[in-house]
Image (tube, rainbow, N blue to C red):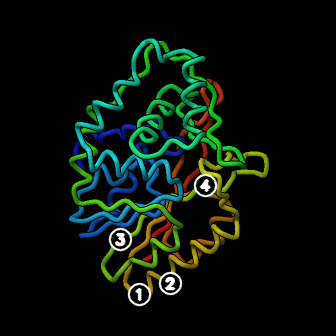
Amino acid sequence: MSNQPTRPFLKWAGGKYRLLEKLTPHLAGKKLIEPFVGSGAVFLNLNFERYLLGDINPDLINLYQCLKKERGQFIRYARSFFIPENNSQAAYLAFRSEFNGDVKGRRRAALFIYLNRHGYNGLCRYNQSGGFNVPFGRYAKPYFPEKEMQHFIKMAKNAMFVCGDYAALMNRARQGDIVYCDPPYVPLSVTASFTSYSKHTFCLNTQANLAAKSAHLANRGVKVVISNHDNEFTRFIYRDAKIESFKVQRFISCAGHNRTSARELIAVYE
């Protein structure tokens, strides 16, 4: 990894850009598998020969597949949405409504970038019906991340992107592979739960199942690294792993005075 990590081209709540220094020493090998790829901050800053990258969010994977396939042509198309006339609440709501219709393929992918950069705080949130429901962000001039998209294209040459459940992707791991899991974090408290960025939920039982599957893979010669909050529950489910704990700043809030510190951990199964 270079001295200055490359930022992902998407804004992403819970992205791991800020944790790269902590994660990188645990992630080295020939093939990296990420069942919760999110914004791709980890894979974009590591040098593996091959990447198998998955996510349960079909809009995210559709975007990555379009960008990998069409490269500069897709960048030019996506950039066409970033004009002053489209930086208004009326335009945003119209595009959001179209996105929540039956639009598919490259246009849906380009709309996803537009919504990500024009929506409130860069959130990616869906209602129970699967509709994208993030309000307009009111930015003076939303940034079009062309440089970051070009870096993504370069790194994606050796990557395969798949949409699906974390367990199905982890089942494809073989001896010597490295698996990095960044699941939706366990809430610090009952009231602190963040609405899932996809319409699927990730309950405490699923968290425990992920931990059990990680221990099983480690017994087969697959190293698994997981990031999460550090609390009593995660300490219990990761009891068979080596744990590194540290304090971080939380950046989900827009208001600076609401940004508080919390403890997170990295659990390593090997």
Give whichever of 108, 224 is nearer the camera.
108
The quarter of the picture where residue 148 lies is: top left
Residue indicated by mark 4? 185
Residue indicated by mark 1? 220
The quarter of the picture where residue 228 lies is: bottom right
Q: How far apart are labels 4 and 1 at the CA level?
A: 26 Å
Is residue 244 in view from this perspective?
Answer: no
Q: Position of residue 71 (x, y in %)?
A: 24, 42
* Residue found at x 59% / y 40%: 101
Q: How far apart are labels 3 and 4 at the CA level?
A: 20 Å
* Residue found at x 78% / y 46%: 191
Q: Earlier in the sequence, mark 4 or mark 2?
A: 4
Q: How far apart are labels 3 and 1 at the CA level?
A: 12 Å
Q: How far apart are labels 2 and 1 at the CA level?
A: 7 Å
Give whichever of 31, 236 is nearer the camera.
31
* Residue found at x 24% / y 37%: 73
Most extreme residue toward the bottom is: 220
Q: Are marks 2 and 1 in contact (CB under 8 Å)?
A: yes
Q: Position of residue 192 (x, y in %)?
A: 73, 45
Mark 2 element type: helix
Amino acid type, label 2 = His
Q: How far apart are labels 2 and 3 at the CA level?
A: 14 Å
Is residue 151 in view from this perspective?
Answer: yes
Label for residue 97?
none
Amino acid type, label 4 = Tyr
Label for residue 216?
2
Label for residue 178?
3
Quarter that holds the C terminus: bottom left
Neighbour class for label 1 at 10 Å: few (<14), some, many (≥20)? some
Neighbour class for label 2 at 10 Å: few (<14), some, many (≥20)? some
Most extreme residue toward the right is: 190
Q: Position of residue 171 (x, y in %)?
A: 45, 79
